């Protein structure tokens, strides 16, 4: 554990590590042991960082790695919308840190600059009773100073996009401030304002051709919309497909 005292919103309890396997894995362990909403795990590096769909998340020093425990009182499908809340909070934080960068969102929760991925969100939950999560862990990785080479979807970092150096503790303070504000909006007003802000900065615009990778197959079509629950709507030759989970690639 490291000793640092970043300024966090009321109700957050920081657990900081110099190095850990995965903040998401440890957050799930703490949540199962009863850790409360607002428990925030933050590490300077991860040795077994995980991305979505079982991919590794390269987690060397200089970037941002954190996982927040929430205990939302809603069905698990609605809890998935917290991934959009997290993406908007990352975007807000990056914009506040470096106003010159233009941030965009790719479904479901990727954050892009110049069509390259600068940040990702890994949302994990456990349901033990009537489709309601007992907890949700929101894992956030942001490439501040470096980004991995050779990823399937091109990656970038804040520094590569012209930002001056950003320290992970500044990112921590900015992310939590923006997350708290967006979470309050989502809890008070639902998904509509989150959806509207996300769509206003969507990396892929309506009608743009995309390829969507599902678990066992890929679908080609064009991006239609995000519905009012957060599903992707894909136009396939006039037929609308509703997709709850997958990976989107723009077709050049
Ligand atoms: C993605 O694939 O886009 C999601 C990446 C999420 C990475 C973060 S880093 C902090 C937290 N701990 C992990 O092991 N993964 C998430």
Image (spheres, grey):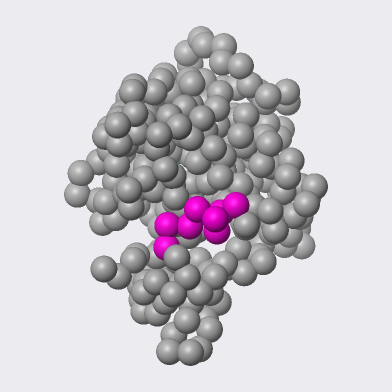
Residue 167: x and y, percent? 41, 20
Q: Residue at 54% of width from left, 37% of height from top? A: 92
Residue located farthest toward the bottom when viewing the structure as drawn: 238
Tell me the magenta residue range: 197-204
Which is nearer the eye, 166 or 22? 166
Left/right of residue 53 with respect to residue 39 in the rendered view: left
Viewport quadrant of the C terminus: bottom left
Left/right of residue 1 with respect to residue 227 in the rendered view: left
Residue 145: x and y, percent? 31, 28
Which is nearer the eye, 9 or 38? 9
Q: State whether residue 161 appears in this view.
A: yes
Left/right of residue 219 with respect to residue 15 in the rendered view: left
Residue located farthest toward the left when viewing the structure as drawn: 150
Residue located farthest toward the front when viewing the structure as drawn: 100
Task: Locate residue 27: give its quadrant.
Answer: top right
Q: Residue at 44% of width from left, 44% of height from top? A: 103
Asked if residue 223 is positioned above or below residue 86 in the image, the reply reads below
Which is nearer the eye, 46 or 229? 229
Q: Residue at 52% of width from left, 11% of height from top? A: 4
Residue 219: x and y, percent? 38, 79
Does the magenta portion include 104?
no
Asked if residue 243 is positioned above or below residue 200 in the image, the reply reads below
Residue 247: x and y, percent? 41, 64
Asked if residue 2 is positioned above or below residue 9 in the image, the reply reads above
């Amino acid at each position: 554990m490291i000793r640092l005292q970043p300024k966090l919103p009321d109700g957050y309890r920081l657990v900081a590590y110099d190095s850990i396997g995965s903040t998401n894995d440890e957050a799930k362990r703490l949540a199962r042991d009863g850790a409360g909403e607002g428990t925030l795990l933050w590490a300077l590096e991860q040795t077994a960082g995980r991305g979505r769909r079982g991919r590794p998340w390269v987690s060397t020093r200089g970037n941002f790695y954190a996982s927040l425990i929430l205990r939302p009182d809603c069905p698990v499908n609605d809890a998935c919308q917290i991934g959009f809340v997290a993406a908007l909070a990352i975007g807000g934080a990056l914009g506040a840190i470096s106003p010159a960068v233009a941030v965009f969102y790719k479904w479901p929760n990727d954050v892009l600059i110049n069509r390259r991925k600068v940040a990702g969100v890994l949302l994990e939950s456990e349901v033990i009773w009537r489709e309601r999560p007992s907890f949700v862990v929101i894992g956030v990785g942001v490439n501040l100073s470096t980004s991995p080479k050779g990823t399937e979807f091109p990656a970038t970092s804040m520094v590569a996009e012209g930002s001056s150096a950003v320290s992970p503790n500044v990112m921590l303070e900015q992310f939590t401030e923006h997350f708290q504000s967006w979470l309050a909006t989502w809890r008070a007003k639902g998904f509509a304002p989150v959806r509207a802000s996300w769509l206003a900065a969507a990396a892929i615009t309506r009608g743009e051709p995309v390829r969507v990778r599902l678990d066992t197959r890929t679908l080609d079509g064009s991006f239609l919309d995000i519905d009012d629950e957060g599903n992707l709507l894909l136009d396939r030759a006039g037929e609308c497909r509703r997709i709850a989970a997958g990976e989107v690639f723009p077709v050049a």
